[in-house]
Amino acid sequence: MRIISIGCPVPSPSVDNHSIANAPSIFDYDACVIDVQSVSEQIEGIAASTLDVKASDGRTISPGESGAFHFGLAELLRQRQMEFQLLLDRGGVLIVFAYANVRHPNVAAFPGLNRYSLIPGPGGDPFSWPTLRPADGKDIEAVIPQHAASGFLEELTGRLRYRAMFDLKSSGDGTVIARSIGGAAIAAEFQVGPGKIITLPPADNLSTSQRKTFSNALLEMIERLVQEPEQQAAPVWVRRYDTPEAAAARDDLSAAQDDLKQAQRRVAEAESLVADSTRFQSMLWQSHNRAFQDVVQDAFRLLGYSVASPDGAVELRDGSEVSVVELSSASSAISDRLYLTLQSRIEDQYLRRKSRPKGIIVGNGFRQTDPRIRREPFPKALVNACETFGYAIIPVEALFELVTFASEAADEPEVLEEIRRSIAEASGVLEIALEEEIDEEEEEEIEAASGPPGNGAVATPAEAS
């Protein structure tokens, strides 16, 4: 098996390492590895006459047309374009380390040239905007365990950095083989005639020893890609030649596939139901992020408030009464500086609207501890200030109990009105008795299972709000 690498050093005696300028004919190889950013940099350097390189025959590469003593850049690139196509036409494999696309307008003799112009275009033109977009990250998950690239992706965990993402509209455009932890498609396989293109995240600042691991994993992947036969679907007419055993097995497979689809549908429905029915539980442990704010806002809506979030801040309306809400969820106690933020918002509204709204703090101190054994999640200075100025502090476990109660009394508006009145009249911590009381023995078991009971934890910078 013959392998050539363009712009990507692969230290191995079985790999010929070259640049886009000095490489021999690419179609003479079984597989080619190309780093498109490295190729882009060389194209720009030659076009700007700041890079002195030679072709495989020793001629200097020049920005203009070819002559007796120099090779024109545009002619070189069109030759490479043809060589990549011939490689794929004979069933070869092209490994592309993907970056976002860029244009190369300085190569006047090759109008429309961009970073992927040399790569034969699969169906759907996946290398053009908006299908291929800039991205950046290191958390990568292989999604097809049996794919030849999965071993490479797992072996290089933490040593690859994706620089682009695909937005493939249909499975016919290509097969996603890896995603970011957020679900973005960052590695894919495309069929081009009998050949295939594999796009992968590039390596990220490898040391010498890591480069060897990279090389070994890359070569193992290429060997599998080149040697594995394509699984072609049998023609429809072959079923006329089914034996009784084959026909029965085919029927069993169809029945099992139907059962699987029905089971998957039931699982999806059950997962949706669980997510909907447990969404308010998340505010008991969620860190301070947008999801935490969203579920708290939904809780207040269930209690009968109109909720708005101008400029990202939470405001409640109950008839003509307005309340401003500050939120915080932390691994330690809630910061007493939250009072200053709340006071500033109240004064700002008073100056603008000539009315002083109610102040409410929703806090989730020691969020990683069972609410039944949390101790002093609110500093005394914060509690004293809120009691003095008539601001309400609502622990999230109290808000959860109110929401649970309101869900059962959804058809009783007077009950919801009473809940809102109790919040409006609260000064300091709103006390709600938890439904489940625990004894000392159970408290010790909870502490042993979940760690210290709250007052020893340290908040992360993101939580210390």
Image: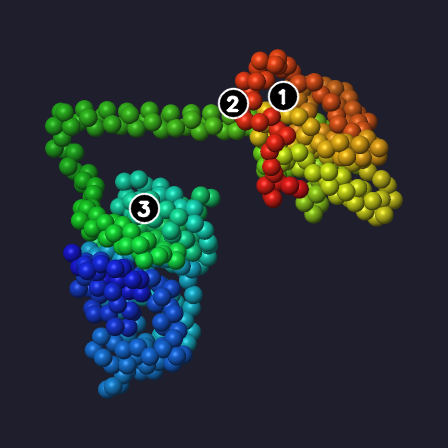
- 10 Å neighbourhood of mark 3: few (<14), some, or many (≥20)? some
Q: Amino acid at mark 3?
A: Glu
Taking the spot 22% from the left edge, 75% from the top edge, the residue there is: 56
What residue do we see at 57% from left, 18% from top? 444
Crowding near the residue tagged with mark 2, few <14, some 14–19, many ≥20 C-alpha atoms within 10 Å: few
Residue lying furthest front in this view?
A: 456
Q: Quadrant of the N terminus?
A: bottom left
Query: What residue is rendered at 32% in x and 46% in y?
Result: 155
Above-or-below relation of 212 to 453: below
Q: How is the image coloured?
A: rainbow
Could you tell me residue 262's position as x and y percent? 37, 26
**Number of the label disc, if any, that sits on residue 155:** 3
Q: Which residue position is annotated with label 1?
A: 372
**Local secondary structure at mark 3:** helix
Image quadrant in which you'd find residue 94: bottom left
* Location of residue 387 in the rendering, given as x and y in whole percent from the top left corner: 81, 30
Disc 2 to disc 1, C-alpha distance: 13 Å
> Mark 2 sits on what residue?
449
User: Image check: 334 left or right of 222?
Assistant: right
**Total number of numbered discs in the rendering:** 3
The three-letter amino acid code for the residue at tag 1 is Arg
Label 2 secondary element: helix
In the image, what residue type sits under mark 2?
Ala
Marks 1 and 3, the one that precedes in the sequence: 3
Disc 1 crowd, CA 10 A, few/some/many (<14, 14-19, 20+):
some
Q: Earlier in the sequence, mark 2 or mark 1?
A: 1
For marks 1 and 3, give the CA distance: 44 Å
State how far apart marks 3 and 2 are (Cα): 35 Å
